[in-house]
Amino acid sequence: QVQLVESGGGLVQAGGSLRLSCAASGRPFSTYARAWFRQAPGKEREFVAAISWNGIGTNYADSVKGRFTVSRDNARNTVSLQMNSLKPEDTAVYYCAADQHYSRNYYASSAYDYWGQGTQVTVSS
């Protein structure tokens, strides 16, 4: 059974930090590209960050560059998103995703076959 399970969401004040984690099972996810997306109320799901299977390749949305860092631990099949200097506009449900390939369209939801259920991040002003 394929599972992607996010954790680490919560309520934080603006300027604060949170660390999200996504544990994966049911596939050889240590060889898969992984990514984070988010969806705010009334908005479309948007790309946040992506990382190649070996961690060498990373990409970020312009809105989070310099504040968020994506990393992975292949021994534990987990990927993390360290979020610093959080802003109220970062409030959203955050989803982790995975796919066999690190597509040139890494920023598109359609590039990923596997998804978690999401974890809520709320940043108060």
Image (cartoon, rainbow, N blue to C red):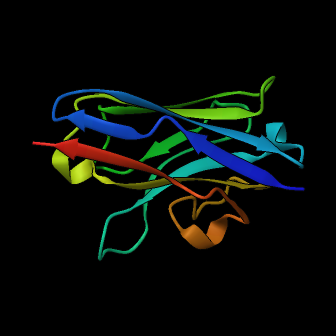
Q: Position of residue 37 (x, y in %)?
A: 48, 56
Q: Residue at x 83, y 41 (%)?
A: 31
**To which quarter of the image does residue 83 belong?**
top left
Residue nearer the viewer, 63 or 19: 19
In the rendered view, does 41 fall on the left or right side of 25?
left
In the rendered view, does 83 fall on the left or right side of 91?
right
Which residue occupies the extreme left position in the image?
125
Instruction: Relative to 80, say whether 98 is above or below.
Output: below
Report the label total: 0
Q: Position of residue 64 (x, y in %)?
A: 31, 43
Q: Residue at x 56, y 32 (%)?
A: 80
**To which quarter of the image does residue 40 belong?**
bottom left
Q: Residue at x 89, y 43 (%)?
A: 28
In the rendered view, does 103 fall on the left or right side of 2?
left
Q: Position of residue 123 (x, y in %)?
A: 23, 43
Which residue occupies the extreme front position in the image?
11
**To which quarter of the image does residue 21 belong?**
top right
Question: Is the N terminus in the top left, top right, bottom left or bottom right quadrant?
Answer: bottom right
Q: Position of residue 97 (x, y in %)?
A: 63, 55
Instruction: Relative to 2, say whether 17 is above or below.
Output: above
Instruction: Relative to 78, say whether 42 is above or below.
Output: below
Residue nearer the viewer, 73 or 101: 73
In the rendered view, does 80 fall on the left or right side of 115?
left
Q: Residue at x 9, y 42 (%)?
A: 125
